[in-house]
Image: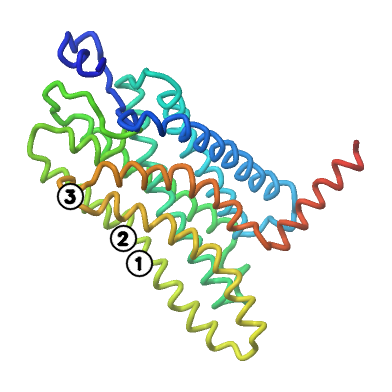
Amino acid sequence: MWPEVMEKGNTSSFEGFILVGFSDRPHLELILFVVVLTFYLLTLLGNMTVILLSALDSRLHTPMYFFLANLSFLDMCFTTGSIPQLLYNLWGPDKTISYLGCAVQLYFVLALGGVECVLLAVMAYDRYAAVCRPLRYTEVMHPRLCGQLASVAWLSGFGNSLIMAPQTLMLPRCGHRRVDHFLCEMPALIGMACVDTVSLEALAFALAIFIILAPLLLILLSYGHIARAVFGIKSAAGRRKAFSTCSSHLLVVSLFYGTIIYMYLQPASAYSQDQGKFLTLFYTIVTPGVNPLIYTLRNKEVKGAVRKVLGKGGAEG
């Protein structure tokens, strides 16, 4: 009952928002706390391991693992920007977040989500070069180009957020402070507005074409060329090897884009809060947690790097 009381009282003394989250399902909060905390710790451990192995083993100093290390760092930042606040809200009765905290969270959720869209497209281009241009791969994917492509991904995501986050936060809400979500996410905040948001939704859709749909189109084009090249390989062993270099990335793309398209490419009026919460929970904690497993499971290079690093540690100890 206390959130309603606060909204009826002097709202000037409370300059923040109330993250409703899963408070309408109190029996789930403790279970979710354990699940979210477990996935968060696994996400940090898994992604930190990928970053360290990519840095310590010279055999992993390749474009593929350079971009994978970027993705791992991105996933760590993405979860750290939202999960601690969610754990705090799940643990006790306090569901509040300050206005500044909400603004920072919204900015980084939008920014890092945009970075991942573009980065996945960059990684698809890397796989295209590896499969379709194997003899010129090192010449095409030289270190300077890899750095430039990674920079484009990071700048695109943060640039998009620099436009959308302030526009979303400045919407009039007529005193409404209850966010029917567990984080400050754009669709939920737009849904709270007490004014017509058609123009803002149109702007969001236009930017989403460049941040979400254009990278997805590049991914599909890359894999169209890859599929044609793979089916042209005569040996079954060669086809399996080519497919194995791309299957992990395809699975990550499917998991990420399947949820992000539902979240950001539909009108706020058609947005289902319950579905939105659980889908956001999926790409906030599950996808970043399983990404390292998807990329490293059955990966001989990573297994070799683990043995090398552990072997050195044992020798030095």
Lateral position of residue 110 relative to residue 249, left or right: left
What residue does disc 1 label?
Answer: 217
* Tag 1 secondary structure: helix
Residue that protrudes farthest toward the left in the picture: 196
Q: Nearer the viewer, residue 196 or 159?
A: 196
Q: How far is disc 3 from disc 1 in space, using C-alphas? A: 25 Å
Lateral position of residue 199 relative to residue 230, left or right: left
Q: How far is disc 1 from disc 2 in space, using C-alphas? A: 6 Å
In the image, what residue occupies the spot 38% across and 46% down? Answer: 157
What residue does disc 2 label?
Answer: 213
Q: Amino acid at mark 3?
A: Ala
Q: Amino acid at mark 1?
A: Leu
Tag of residue 270: 3
Q: Amino acid at mark 2?
A: Leu
Of the numbered discs 3 and 2, the one sitting upstream in the chain is 2
Is mark 1 in CB contact (under 8 Å) with mark 2?
yes
Local crowd at mark 1 within 10 Å, few (<14), some, or many (≥20)? few
Is mark 3 in CB contact (under 8 Å) with mark 2?
no
Q: Position of residue 151 (x, y in %)?
A: 47, 49
Q: Nearer the viewer, residue 12 or 4?
A: 4
* Tag 3 secondary structure: helix
